[in-house]
Amino acid sequence: MARMQKGRDPADVLIIGAGASGSVAAAHLARAGVDVVCLEQGPRVDNAEFYGDKPEWELMAQKRWHPNPNVRDLENDYPINTDASAVNPLMYNAVGGSTILYAAHWQRFMPSDFRVKTLDGVADDWPFTYEDLEPYYSRMDEEFGVSGLAGDPAYPPHRDYPLPPMPIGRIGMKAAEGMNKLGWHWWPGPNSVPSRDYRGRNQCVRYGTCLTGCPHKAKASTDHTHWPMALENGARLVTGARVREITVDAQGLANGATYIDRNGREAHQRAGIVIVCCNGVGTPRLLLMSASKHHPDGLANSSGLVGRNLMMHPYAAVTGTFDEPLESWLGPAGQSIQSMQFYETDTSRGFVRGAKWGVMPSGGPLGLRAAYGGKALDEAWGANLHRNTRKVFGRSFEWGIIAEDLPDEDNRVTLDPELTDSDGLPAPKLIYKNSDNTKRMLDFHVARAEEAMEAAGAASISSTKLMRDCGWHLMGTARMGDDPTRSVVDQYGKSHDVPNLYIYDGSVFVTSSGFNPTGTITAIALRAVEHLIENRSHAKAACSHSKVMS
Amino acid sequence: MTTVSNEERAVFAELADVLIPAAEGMPAASDVDVQGAMLDHILGLRPDLAEAFRRGLSAAAGKPPADAAEALNRDDAEALGAIGIVASAGYYMTPAVREVIGYPGQENRPADPDETPEYVANGMLQQVIDRGPIFVPTPEA
């Protein structure tokens, strides 16, 4: 039983979660003079904890720095029941959130992504357009220090990236040669890693270990991009604080949150406004855990859509092995080149929407072993081990395919009736399957990527049509919209039900696009928080203590 | 911290050599001493492997190593998996092995950001640009 300790000083704004969106919100609110407290269940991470510059890198990537919390099994993680899910959700819980372990592919959605109902007759349009969001994309490019090359014909013209592109390496050149033979689109991939020193971060030295943490303090994780500014401007960051409930006052306003610290003590943080930034699984989990007499189905859930429409981006990979050495352990990883050749809808293919492709390096020799579980002993080991390593290691790369995952109310996050985290709080349970549209999309794209590999001169090609550990992108479970019966929040993340409760993370996505979402999550968070700051004199707040927000 | 006996190290070395034999110009696992200090180092970093690892060694003790490995693969894949991770991680972390396969480790090799990319200089990217825009614009409201 948790012991209650004295509550902290109230805040104008309480942010729950110090990941991508929470960090952007905290930095901009604090800079505007707003008194902010952020509760983060995880710890701060020191870059020296990462193994990317050490021989043990691949060994530790399989456990301590694995992106699946069920594999990592750390106290700052919560378990997730995935028995009914075709895909495992991936995340990290710390200051910086999943940007600690993301691949730093820094993508914009394309204009059509915001208008899929109008263009393709599926799902819903977003309550704003690409053009509405574009200025915020450019500002996030600046704040995250994105390295890239402007002029990609897959987008309307936009401001150049603040840093020159990262090298695409031999693997990118090889892939690009194949694409040009076919006359297909490719472009050097934008990455949120700096190609030269940038705002306190170091130039990327191409360890190629973004997915297991950057040991060089180069990658744009928000513990480096935004928390320094937030803290300099007075934001208060509480780590090891696992929120169990958002509390609501007699007027129906959110007035803070109750959390448990790492000593098992319970505390309450009061605030005038509450912003939830816990990702597409953690946010609906918290809203559902915050059910009360007045909100029996969970907070902000009069639409019944909290937890529904979970989208996780099915991911396929086509790997080509080449006769010549390609140094395919070398970063960025990150991405080398990308393609949107088959992104837009062509109904003659038998499905709607599409997918982004990205070339990634294939890492070290131990990672190549990961696919061998369950095979015959002499196929995976013995002399064949040496033959396979010689054939594949340093000579292969993959076209990774991110398929647009359309919203389906049956794909959802619920609370598990039995499984709990280390504080006894209900774990989320995921129910998720791929649609027929998705399956047809993956079949088509894998076949095209195989053609691209062949055109590039691959000596052998292998394909994985759906990786189970691919749920990096957690979206849709508290969707935005104008209609309170069809959405949870408005276009600025404000709850339709609780007027001082906001959600800024990927939960608010209406559709998923086929892109890595962090650039869009942060652009939406910036747009929302600036709207809140600009309209603060009118914003509903629960406490009268607030000097700034009232 | 797991303490591994000399008997267990001997069993591990034999199993490791079944999985990673001297062949194709490569040394065997025991040739690079995966059963020595490297074993302690790996189990120190990955204590989660210890239980299945030792269970596998216990089951293999006293049996011909090739037969023992086959039996584990059939009856206790988790144990063989743990033994395989410990063996292959130790093997590929060894500098001599890395040298033979041409792996310098994850390299600190920054690029010159001011250098004109080859794909720009040789016109490869211009072909993409010349094909023109490929996006569907936002439809009129």
Image (spheres, rainbow, N blue to C red):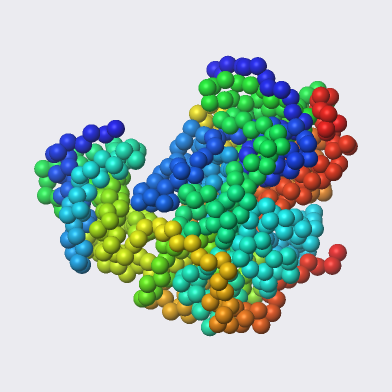
Residue A152: x and y in percent read 66, 71
- Tell me the residue at 74%/24% (across/down): A10
Residue A297 figure quarter: top right
Q: Is residue A301 visible?
A: no
How many tags in the picture? 0
Depth check: give the residue in front, A5 or B75. Answer: A5
**Vertical relation: A213 (above or below) A328:** above
How far across and down, in percent of the image, does residue A523 sit?
71, 52
Answer whether residue A67 is visible to the viewer in this image: yes
Q: Report x, y in % for residue A49.
A: 45, 42
Q: Residue at x 20, y 67 (%)?
A: B24
Asked which quadrant contains residue A529, the reply is top right
In the image, what residue occupies the spot 69% across and 34% down? A235
| Camera-nearest residue between B138 and A98 | A98
Can you say which quadrant of the picture contains the N terminus of chain A? Answer: top right
Residue A105 location, x and y as percent? 58, 58
Image quadrant where one finds the C terminus of chain A? top right
- Seen in the picture, residue A349 relative to A59 is either above or below; the reply is below
The residue that appears at 45% across and 62% down in the rendered structure is B109
> For this rendering, which residue is in front, A317 or B113?
B113
